[in-house]
């Protein structure tokens, strides 16, 4: 069952809110599934949009985008009513690492305090997805919570695992080298979602002028002439530097850099394909593989950008699965210890 509904309450200022509809659907679904899986814990995975908490916030945004970002800051607190009503035994929440240390860190700490007030034992820590077998250096803050019950010996807080001891580091090459080669703007007829964005000529030249893993510092002197970024030139005139990873290729033998919702665009990071015979950015399928989705997981959306947002915003499945299993193990051990007394 998949519900594509807006979690915010409807109001005069925000008529698109569907919180009441969400509640109504969950009031039908959760009792049904609890009766079907007697003794199986209910898990809530809560992930607010990370853009409001990232260190790299756009300076110029439309009024609508600014209002949306402000509203997203309140999404974690909006879930508390659902938690109080439906009493999930287990909770997982994930966001960018800077939610713990940035300007809005109080949102993260307040959420933890509120969960404690609702009777949960909570733990949180920063982790890197590459240490869980995800082929990507993706640092995230992870929160885990278990509903406390009489006789529980969970203590005052939970420990969040920071690595999977059975996982090994996986490189970008290992994750996507099996996929068919593409030209810029190409699409595979054999592999679903294996489609990439086209490039203008100057951006083709930029990718052709850098080796995998190299910075963009050599753009001023290439076989194509000076193909430096105008924005970098303006910053240099002021004695500053721009991002050295944009319009460059990822390193094949290391985990990929953090995928964002704009990983299809080489202007937004080191998202050029490492294979120098393929002068292009990543495809949707490659981005999904670097997030640890299997190749048979299909994405549907209205255009490339909508699917890229799904992939870039996703919690890597391998990381999510490990955290869920870890929580489930704690919950099962807690039940055994309580029933054995």
Image: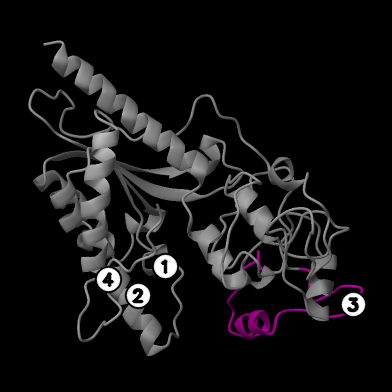
Q: Which mark is residue 18?
A: 4
Q: Residue 46 or 106: which is nearer the viewer? A: 46
Numbered disc 1: secondary structure: helix
How far separated are the C-alphas under marks 2 and 1? 7 Å
Taking 81 as reference, is 196 above or below it?
A: below
Calculate the distance from the C-alpha at mark 2 to the C-alpha at mark 3: 41 Å
The magenta stretch spans which residues?
218-246
Q: Label 4: how many residues lie within 10 Å, few (<14), some (14-19) or many (20+)?
A: some
In primary-sequence order, the first of circles 4 and 1 is 4
Find the distance from the CA under tag 4 to the CA under tag 3. 53 Å
Residues under numbered marks 4 and 3 in contact, where contact means CB atoms less than 8 Å apart: no
| Label 1 neighbour load within 10 Å: few <14, some 14-19, many 20+ | some
- Residue drawn at x 40%, y 82% as measured from the top left: 65
The residue at which mark 1 appears reads as 51
Closer to the chain start, of discs 4 and 2, is 4
> Which residue, given by chain and number where applicable, does mark 2 sit on?
69
Q: Residue at x 60, y 81 (%)?
A: 235
Judged left or right of residue 107, residue 317 is: right
Look at mark 3 in the image and give the residue it sits on: 224
Q: Nearer the viewer, residue 25 or 243?
A: 25
Whether tag 2 and tag 1 are in contact, CB under 8 A, the answer is yes
């Amino acid at each position: 069952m998949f519900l594509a509904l807006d979690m915010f309450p409807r109001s005069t200022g925000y008529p698109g809110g569907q919180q009441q509809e969400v509640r109504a659907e969950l009031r039908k679904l959760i009792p049904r599934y609890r009766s079907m899986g007697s003794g199986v814990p209910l898990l809530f995975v809560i992930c607010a949009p990370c853009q409001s908490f990232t260190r790299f916030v756009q300076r110029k945004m439309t009024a609508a985008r600014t209002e949306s970002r402000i509203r997203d800051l309140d999404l974690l607190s909006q879930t508390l009513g659902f938690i109080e009503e439906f009493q999930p035994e287990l909770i997982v929440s994930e966001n960018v690492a800077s939610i713990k240390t940035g300007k809005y860190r109080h949102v993260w700490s307040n959420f933890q305090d509120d969960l404690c007030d609702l009777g949960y034992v909570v733990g949180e820590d920063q982790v890197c997805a590459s240490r869980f077998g995800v082929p990507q250096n993706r640092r995230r803050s992870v929160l885990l919570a278990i509903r406390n019950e009489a006789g529980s010996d969970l203590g005052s807080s939970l420990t969040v695992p920071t690595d999977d001891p059975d996982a090994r580091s996986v490189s970008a090459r290992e994750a996507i080298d099996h996929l068919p080669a593409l030209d810029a703007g190409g699409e595979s007829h054999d592999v679903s979602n294996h489609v990439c964005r086209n490039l203008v000529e100057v951006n083709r030249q930029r990718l052709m002028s850098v080796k995998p893993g190299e910075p963009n510092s050599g753009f001023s002197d290439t076989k194509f002439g000076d193909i430096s970024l105008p924005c970098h030139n303006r910053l240099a005139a002021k004695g500053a530097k721009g991002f050295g990873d944009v319009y460059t290729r990822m390193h094949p033998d290391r985990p990929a850099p953090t995928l964002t919702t704009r990983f299809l665009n080489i202007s937004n990071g080191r998202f050029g394909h490492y294979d120098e015979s393929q002068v292009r950015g990543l495809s949707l399928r490659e981005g999904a593989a670097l997030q640890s989705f299997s190749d048979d997981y299909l994405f549907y959306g209205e255009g490339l950008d909508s699917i890229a947002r799904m992939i870039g915003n996703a919690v890597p499945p391998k990381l999510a699965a490990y955290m869920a299993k870890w929580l489930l193990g704690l919950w099962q051990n807690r039940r055994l210890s309580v029933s054995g007394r």
